Image (cartoon, rainbow, N blue to C red):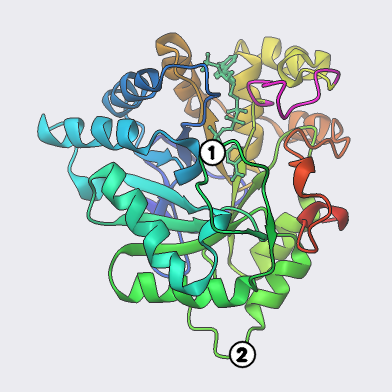
Amino acid sequence: MSVSLQPSMFLTKDTRLTLHDGNAIPVMGLGTYASAEVPKSDGTEATKLAIDLGYRHIDCAYIYGNEVQIGEAIRSKIADGTVKREEIFYTGKLWCSFFSPNLVRQGLEASLKALQLDYLDLFIMHWPFSVKPSDAHSNQPLDFDDVDFCLTWEALEGCKDAGLVKSIGVSNFNRRQLERLLSKPGLKYKPVCNQVEYHVYLNQSKLHEYCKCHNIVLVAYSVLGTARDNTWVDPNSPVLLEDPVLRSVAAKYNRSPAEVAMRFILQKGAVVLAKSFNPTRLKQNLGVFEFELKPEDMEMLDGLNRNLRYAQFTVMKQHPEYPFHDEY
Ligand SMILES: NC(=O)c1ccc[n+]([C@@H]2O[C@H](COP(=O)([O-])OP(=O)(O)OC[C@H]3O[C@@H](n4cnc5c(N)ncnc54)[C@H](OP(=O)(O)O)[C@@H]3O)[C@@H](O)[C@H]2O)c1
């Protein structure tokens, strides 16, 4: 079932939103980012189980260093007949060290090779800023580069024309950066989505409104408040799933705080990504399709906004394209 973007609608795990290029994105995606100490094989097992449970949208990235394992899980579920390749919606992300137009195809092919897939459903620029080409998985500090993302975008358009990706989009772009891309002379394809941090503490209402006006789907990450990895999340930041208001709404519906946190985003009309490698929680998170939040509860959850960003990527703060200096 594929539908156009409506803030409040009857939703199931099979609901897809129609992208402006005609492709369709499942409204619920499995996040696959895990910190370095989590065995990569956990991602394989979780992705296989997720597909068995009915998840059809898998979000991953070159920089997560687990495309081999996630690809293996997808291919094994195709091989055993659980799904066909065309039923899976796989999102990959171009890492910032591949932004030079002559490196974009190489960045994509590195992902395709690791995944052992012929194409990606969605390929997005991971951030609006570039870093110098280097081994992205080394521990070297990130060296700023100044590649214009509009030029990178032209190379992404080429990847779509070559049939290597079905749709192209961006991630972590602010309004000004989206505007610059949309007004680029000779733009061939508009981005289908902007993947951004979006949850009850970071209500992206202005950016979401802007994206709706341009038919760009907002894909929400860290909806559950992240895994609180202290290498990039401030340990003093509030724990989203422990929020008393969120918990009281969850109790009212006899649902977990995680289900309410995700349902809130879905009813806002965005696509939700949620990471879990735990079998019980993977199953429980699909409960998000078994209830609907009433308008007064949506309003109460809206009131939790405090413009709190867990993922600040502070090492990039001095880069001219760092996106989070602007209001939105
Ligand atoms: N574009 C970007 O720059 C960007 C940035 C960040 C994230 N992302 C994407 O978005 C995905 C999700 O974001 P995220 O990984 O930051 O975190 P998240 O989905 O907000 O939270 C993940 C954490 O929540 C836990 N969890 C899952 N279900 C739960 C439940 N029902 N109750 C309690 N805890 C639960 C998980 O633990 P268990 O695994 O133990 O269940 C994990 O610790 C990522 O994996 C990645 O694919 C993209």
Q: Is residue 90 left or right of residue 27?
A: left
Name the residue at 76% across, 62% down.
Answer: 321
Name the residue at 31% across, 36% down.
Answer: 68
- Please state which amino acid type lies under the numbered disc 1: Ser
Please state the horizontal and vertical placement of residue 269, each as a whole percent of the image: 60, 48
Please tell me whether residue 230 belongs to the stretch shown in magenta.
yes
Mark 1 lies on residue = 138
Q: Nearer the viewer, residue 201 or 3?
A: 201
Secondary structure mostly taken by the magenta-highlighted segment of the chain: loop
Name the residue at 37% across, 70% down.
Answer: 159
Instruction: Give the spatial CA distance, label 2 vs label 1.
Output: 36 Å
Please state the horizontal and vertical placement of residue 133, each as a whole percent of the image: 54, 58
Q: Secondary structure at mark 1?
A: loop
Mark 2 CB within 8 Å of ligand 1: no
Q: Secondary structure at mark 2?
A: loop
Quarter of the rendering containing residue 62: top left
Q: Earlier in the sequence, mark 2 or mark 1?
A: 1
